[in-house]
Every structure is written in C-alpha cells, then in structure tokens.
Image (cartoon, rainbow, N blue to C red):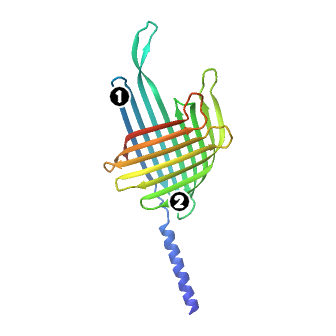
Amino acid sequence: MKNSLLAAALSTLLISGVSFAEEKKYSEEHSYKASAELGFLYKTGNSKSGDIKTGFDFEHEYARWRSELKANLLYKKTEVEETDDQGNVTDEFETSDQKFTLDAKTNYTLEADGKNYMYGSFGYVDDRFSSFDYQATVSAGWGKKWYETETTSFFADIGPGFKRDRIMADGDVESENDDSFIVQAQGLYTQQINEHVQFKQLVRAIQALESGKNSIYRAESSLTTKLIETLQVKISFIVDHNTEVSEGDKKTDTQTAVTLVYSF
C-alpha cells in the first residue's frame, strides 16, 4: 500500500515537473520589434531656429536570447549674424546642437523562470557641444528581473567594464584619450498605466574606479500614449551628468522632447 502511494506521488511530481518545463519552454521562433520616432520644431520671429529629434529602436528575441539596439539623434540650427571683411551683415544658419547616441545590449536568461540573466552592452555618445569628441563604454555582468506583473516590471543589472572619453581639443591642448575601468549599474521600471498609456523610467550609473576620472549618470523618463495601433505620441525628459568636464562647460545637460513614434 505504502509503495503504491509512493509510486503515485512520484508519478504526480514527474507529471507536474514535465508540465512546468513545458510552460517555461522558450520559443524557438525569432521575434522582432522595431519603432522609429521623429520630432521637429521651427521657430521664427526675433530669432530663427530649427530642431530635429529622431530615433530608432530594434528588439530581437530568440529562445533565451534578447537583444536591443537604440539610436537617437538631436540636431539644431540657429540663425546668427555674420559680418564679412567689408562690414556687410548677413543672416546665416549654423549648427548649435548636435548629439548622437547609440546603445546596444544582449541578455541571456540563465534559468527556466527567466529571472536571472547575463548581459553584454555597448554605449556610444557623440556630442559636438560638450567636452568630448566622443564617449564609448563596454560592460558585461549579471542582472535580474526583480518584479513583474501583467502591467509592471522592474529589471536591474550590474557589471564591470571599460570606458574611453575622447577629450576635445581646446586651444593649445590637443585631443587625447581618457581611459578608465568602470562599474556600470542600471535599472528599468515600466508601468502600463492603461491600455493606451505606458510610463518608463531608466536610471544608469557608469562609475569610474579611479579617483579623479569622469563618471557618467543618466536618468530618462518617458510617457507614451497610443493614438492608433502603430502610432504613438511620446513625451520624454533626459538628464545627463558628467562629473569631470572642461573648464567653462556645464556638468549637467537636460533634454525635453515630444515626438511621434511609429511601430512596425
């Protein structure tokens, strides 16, 4: 009798285990998502200027792999008065802001429940009106899906890496590389407020390990409202902070934008 009960219990556990494994089995099909956004502002009157903000997001999922690529460009031209050698004054448009950012990241889920993952990431910033010709970072480490429901999720990861800041030439000072080892930590909170509105909050810290080296901090908040199935309006606010900049440059930049996003 006891042996029969034990056999039945083991059979139940095995069946449950098989069912659990089937529920957690990852899809062997490739999944793709992409979106493009565009915002434009043109000002006339006492002064003239034109602003363009554009971006592209791409996501790919396969089995336990998840990869994403994000590219953004901000470009602005402002009207200024130019005086030639004869003293003639003309109005010309010149570039007054230009910033390009690229972020790539790949995650590999470690277990069936999908909570823990390993990641590798690359970041690149080219801001023509900053202290740097460009800034590049690479990092790899561990992350976890700390909280997830049908409407809310929170991911966070941390790992070591390497950063290169190409310091812009200034007067008699030539351009040079400023390299440092880093620890990168970031968290992403997502809240689906209702069927049409989604809120996202990203926080990232790139901490240089050596004293006196530049560390980078970023906070990005966005609110996206769906107009139709493939078209949304996005309001975003970004804060970028560098701890070490050239004399006369500000350490903190902010960016507020309203863009249209097309998903396909």
The residue lying at 56 percent from left, 43 percent from top is 122
Judge from the rendering whether residue 35 lies leftward or rightward of residue 117; answer left or right: left
The residue lying at 49 percent from left, 69 percent from top is 22
Judge from the rendering whether residue 226 lies leftward or rightward of residue 200; answer left or right: left
Q: Amino acid at mark 2?
A: Trp
The mark that comes first in sequence, 2 or 1, is: 1
The picture places residue 34, in percent across and down from the top left corner, at 42, 47
The residue lying at 50 percent from left, 52 percent from top is 188
Write down the quadrant of residue 251 in the picture: top right
Which residue occupies the foreground of this view, 173 or 262? 173
In the orientation shown, which residue stands out farthest toward the top?
Answer: 86
Q: Which mark is residue 43?
A: 1
Which residue occupies the foreground of this view, 165 or 215? 215
Q: Amino acid at mark 1?
A: Lys
In the orientation shown, which residue stands out farthest toward the bottom?
Answer: 1
Q: Residues within 10 Å of mark 2 (few under 14, many from 20)?
A: few
Residue to which mark 2 is pinned:
146
Write down the quadrant of residue 109 in the picture: bottom right
The N terminus: image quadrant:
bottom right
Q: Is residue 60 above or below residue 236?
A: below
